[in-house]
Image (tube, rainbow, N blue to C red):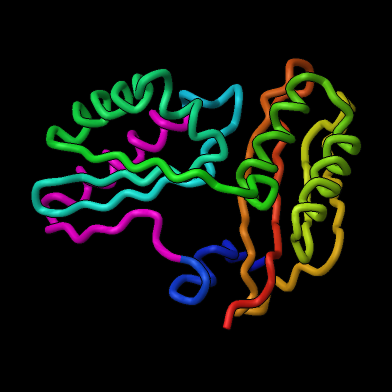
Amino acid sequence: MGQKVDPRSFRLQTSKDWSSKWFARKSDFKKWLVQDVKIRELIEGRFRERPAIVRIEIERSLNLTTINIFTAKAGAVIGKAGAGVNEIKAQVEKIVEGPVRINIEEVKKPELSAKLVAENIARQLEKRINFRRAMKMAIQNTMHAGAKGIRIQVAGRLNGAEMSRSEKLIEGSVPLHTIRADIDFHVAHAQTPSAGIVGIKVWIYKGERD
């Protein structure tokens, strides 16, 4: 029986920060939490086939909800003449029932995002690409982008096998128990046509924080 901790929550207030920043009264907490989940599902759902969202930060003040979208494809999120952002804003305003401000920030090195790496592997597995090839290509691209180390683990009926199993590949160093270590982590799921759900976990080590 293992005692496993998410590398992001393990490093809160050192190299990581909260993805939602607000303080609510007891009567509002449940409502706001559900709204946050719906907002994330709405934005992520628009780009499921072509992963582009690195992370979403939600900040709330008394009369305004601010959503910061970090993306590898700012043009795809903004849309033609800002149509994409306006559509997202209108849908989010219906969820929060109030004014919303959306900020788009482009991420320069998407290969260093565990979320994008995991989701890209998931999309490849859904297209019946060999899991080892997908893992090795992801590791190669991430290490060339400047990562100190990467670990990828996939689990399920790999390549349509009868029995489920897990496989992992590690390149470089991934010090999970060093709090100073800046490690990005994400879990993704591939809905394969013949082998059901395959899980993908990705850890990317970017170096130590002071």
Residue drawn where x is 77% and y is 58% of the image: 150
Q: Position of residue 71 (x, y in %)?
A: 51, 40
Position of residue 25 measured from the top left corner of the image (x, y, whole percent): 12, 58
Count up the numbered dots: 0
* Residue 92, x across and y down, in percent: 26, 30
Residue 30 on the magenta span: yes
Farthest residue to the bottom: give it.
210
Q: Residue shown at 45%/29% (left/top)?
A: 77
Nearest the camera: 62 or 198?
62
Image: magenta residue range:
17-44
In this rendering, is residue 80 above or below 164? above
Q: Is residue 182 a member of the stretch shown in magenta?
A: no
Tell me: 114 left or right of 134.
Answer: left
Secondary structure mainly formed by the magenta segment: helix
Q: Position of residue 128 (x, y in %)?
A: 82, 20
Query: Which image quadrant for residue 34?
Result: top left
Residue at (55%, 26%) from the top-left corner? 48
Q: Tell me if residue 39 comes above or below residue 171 in the rendering.
A: above
